[in-house]
Image: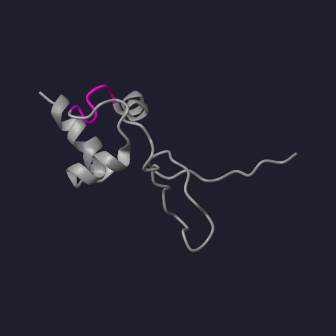
Amino acid sequence: MSSKHFPKGLDGRQRDQSPPKAGQIREKRADTKVETLRDQYGPNFAPDFRSDAHLGTVRDKTGKSLHQLVRDTKKALEP
């Protein structure tokens, strides 16, 4: 059994190689729970939301993308 090797981008994530989405990074699903995202991005991710809230809810209420939310989390940790 052979496995495909997908090249990784500069950020270490694998990118789609087939058109029309070639080079795009797949988005997180809207039904991903905040608890899961806190495991990945740190305990301070979306502090105003319960751990059982979904990413789609956080995006709707804050008007921010996941990238912006992660950036805000990192800024909050800076001295």
Which residue is at a point 43% across and 32% down the rendered structure image? 36
Q: Residue furthest left?
A: 79
| SS majority, magenta | loop
Give me the residue at 27% from left, 53% from top: 60
Assess whether residue 43 is covered by the magenta stretch.
yes
Seen in the picture, residue 39 relative to 12 is either above or below; the reply is above
Front one among 32 and 37: 32
Would you say 60 lies left or right of 4 here? left
Coloured how?
A: one colour
Q: From this viewpoint, which residue is outermost toward the right?
A: 1
Which residue is at the front of the view, 16 or 66?
Answer: 66
Q: What number of labels is visible? A: 0
Question: Residue visible at 26% across and 34% down?
Answer: 49
Question: Could you tell me residue 23's position as x and y percent?
Answer: 52, 64
What residue sits 55% from the left and 68% below the top?
22
The magenta region covers 42-47
Classify 58 as above or below 22: above
Indicate the position of residue 32 as horizontal and vertical percent values. Answer: 44, 42
Quadrant where the image shows the N terminus = top right
Where does the C terminus fall, quadrant-wise?
top left
- Is residue 55 a member of the stretch shown in magenta? no
Please indicate whether residue 3 sits to the left or right of residue 27 in the image.
right
Looking at the image, residue 78 sits to the left or right of residue 56; the answer is left
View extreme (bottom): residue: 20
Q: Is residue 53 left or right of residue 11?
A: left
Residue 34 x, y percent position in the rendering: 36, 35
